[in-house]
């Protein structure tokens, strides 16, 4: 028990030193922990792997709920038929929700719901005035 008392006394001294020198000190232990499993009311970005066409209905529910999906289709990249079916089904979902879909890289897709558009033109160089 002496170890815990000594640790608490050191923490109190540290807090007094921070106050003495005018530094802002925030005890992170007293802050409320945020639950990252639930969205804070707005849309969230979800990441998923597509292992087959059968997963599309479950993933599309996230888009219908207003979330953005970043999908990795590496597991089915070599199966042209499965990949084409999955992408066509995702395109139907996007049409349903009036969203947008775009390839990010060779094996990634970005699927957005209504209210989000994807600018498919690659930016060459950001001008200093735009920063």
Image (spheres, grey):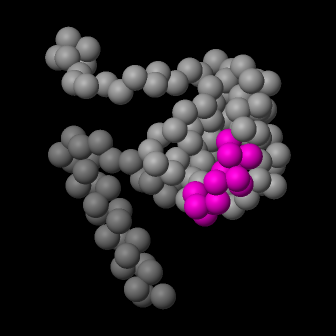
Looking at the rendered image, the quarter that the C terminus falls into is top left
Asked which quadrant contains residue 79, the reply is bottom right
Left or right of residue 27, residue 84 in this image: right
Left or right of residue 126, residue 79 in this image: right
Q: In the image, is residue 5 part of the stretch drawn in magenta?
A: no
Left or right of residue 27, residue 21 in this image: left
Asked which quadrant contains residue 87, the reply is top right
Position of residue 5 measured from the top left corner of the image (x, y, whole percent): 42, 79
Q: In the image, is residue 76 part of the stretch drawn in magenta?
A: yes
Residue occupying the point 20% across, 11% down: 129
Q: Is residue 94 above or below residue 21?
A: above
Question: Relative to the observer, which residue lies in front, 120 or 85?
Answer: 85
Position of residue 90 measured from the top left corner of the image (x, y, whole percent): 72, 38
User: In the image, which residues are magenta?
Assistant: 75-87
Q: Is residue 48 visible?
A: no
Residue occupying the point 37% across, 76% down: 7
Residue occupying the point 45% across, 54% down: 28
């Amino acid at each position: 028990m002496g170890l815990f008392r000594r640790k608490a006394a050191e923490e109190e001294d540290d807090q007094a030193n921070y106050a003495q020198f005018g530094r802002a000190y925030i005890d992170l232990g007293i802050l409320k922990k945020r639950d990252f499993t639930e969205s804070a009311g707005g849309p969230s970005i979800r990441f998923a792997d597509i292992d087959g066409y059968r997963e599309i209905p479950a993933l599309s529910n996230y888009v219908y709920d207003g979330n953005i999906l970043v999908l990795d289709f590496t597991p089915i990249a070599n199966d042209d038929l499965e990949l084409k079916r999955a992408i066509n089904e995702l395109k139907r979902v996007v049409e349903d929700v009036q969203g947008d879909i775009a390839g990010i890289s060779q094996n990634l897709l970005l699927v957005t719901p209504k209210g989000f558009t994807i600018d498919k033109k690659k930016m060459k160089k950001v001008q200093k005035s735009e920063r």
